[in-house]
Amino acid sequence: MRSGHRIWINFVAQAKMFFRSIGSVFWTVAFPVLLILLFGAIFSGSGSATYTLYVQDLDSSEASAMYIHGLNETKVLNLIMVGPEVDATSYIKDNSIATFLIIPEGFHNAFAPEPFQQNTSVELRMDNSSSSAMAVASVVNAVTQSVNLGLANGSMLISTDLQGISANNQYTYIDFFLPGVIGLTAMTSTVNWMVGLQTRYRSNGIFKKLATTPITQLEWLVSLMIWQVITVFMSVAIILIVGILAFDVHLTLDLLSIAIIILTSAMFSALGLIIARFVKEEETAGAAAGAITFPMMFLGGSFFPLESMPDYLQAIAKVMPLTYVNNGLRDAMIYGNSSGAFYNLMIVAVLTAVFVIVGVAISTWKQD
């Protein structure tokens, strides 16, 4: 009896400690639920997912209009029409497009009466690094085959010519994935480190001592940002080395991508400072950081193209800072889209400024 009583007392003590620790409850209960809800929301709508396909009709005939109507009737493709006067190559690069269909001039000849029918092909330019590109190619092929069946009992009057999205045709999904890993790593490492450091210093009374020194909150934050930039670039170097050696990735680390990485480190450091302001106990730091970073991890486009998600999740993703980090890195490192990368860089810069101002404004060392 005494042994059983001691076991029971210790069991109750451990249970109380568990439920008093928000971090333990988060990782044991809330985190699995969060994963189920996020992945369920992403994949439950996969059956009705739509993929964006840009279409340029150079034939402008009744036949090409019927073909486009067939694509639209699949309910899987969101068609965006591009004028025939537009240069396809430049348009694809400037807009970081993953799938672009060109209906050639003379397409209508395939619909002519026998024996005047002529073979033709539609050109589908696709980004091999996009996981949704093959899904689009499958739909286009299916529509093309159904048209062939109606024209000549399945004879290949119309074919689908698959082309790489650019002259650099070596990109694969791993190339799409790696910029997302860089953005994800920058976010998780800086936010978790900053929240943990801030709560630990608050618990140990270090901030009250710092309040008696000449250093300001802004100077404190800038010094931490600089250190985080260095550690993030260490991670980036490791990611790129492993990617090149193990998977032969083809990424370009240019000035724009470097600027995005620097600002990303600063932005999430400032965000970590804001989060830490509302965390009172060191034990809850990990849970608080995870509650912010995990939704962005799965909805910010690190693993999946945003267009593969339901519309309401895409709307949520557009308010997440990581989305613009990932978009900017892919524009700079994969697509060579300088204007797109610069646009996302500016968004990250504005968010960084906002987070820094808010973080410094709500920091009160004397009360901590």
Image (cartoon, grey):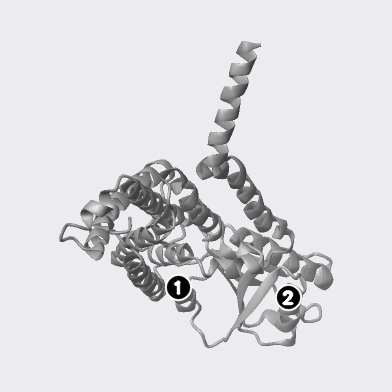
Where 81 sits versus 172, above or below? Answer: below
**Residue 107 numbered mark, or none:** none
User: From where the camera sits, is residue 303 visible?
Assistant: no
Q: How many marks?
A: 2
Question: Is residue 72 placed above or below 84 in the rendered structure?
Answer: above
Q: Residue at x 35, y 68 (%)?
A: 352
Q: Residue 13, located in which quarter of the rendered image?
A: top right
Q: Residue at x 52, y 63 (%)?
A: 127
Q: Nearer the viewer, residue 334 or 258?
A: 258
Three-letter amino acid code at the position of disc 2: Asn
Q: CA distance from mark 2 to mark 1?
A: 24 Å
Amino acid type of the residue that numbered disc 1 sits on in the rendered structure: Lys
Where is residue 99 drawn, in percent x and y? 57, 68
Camera-side residue of 357 and 242: 357
Q: Is 298 rendered above or below residue 80?
A: above
Residue 199 visible in the picture: yes
Question: Secondary structure beneath disc 2?
Answer: helix
Residue at 68% across / 53% down in the picture?
40
For marks 2 and 1, the one nearer the N-term is: 2
Image location of residue 48, percent across then percent down: 73, 64
In the rendered image, which quarter contains the C terminus? bottom left
Estimate how packed mark 2 is, as few (under 14), some (14 to 19) or many (20 or more) residues with alpha carbons within 10 Å. some
Q: Residue 259's spot in the image, x, y percent?
A: 30, 65
Q: Residues within 10 Å of mark 1 (few under 14, many from 20)?
A: some
Placement of the N terminus among the 4 image quadrants: top right
Q: Which mark is residue 93?
A: 1
Q: Marks 1 and 2: in contact by CB < 8 Å? A: no
Q: Secondary structure at mark 1?
A: helix
Q: Which residue is mark 2?
A: 72
| Residue 310: percent from left, percent from top | 66, 65
Identity of the residue drawn at 50% across and 66% down? 320
The residue lying furthest to the left in this view is 214
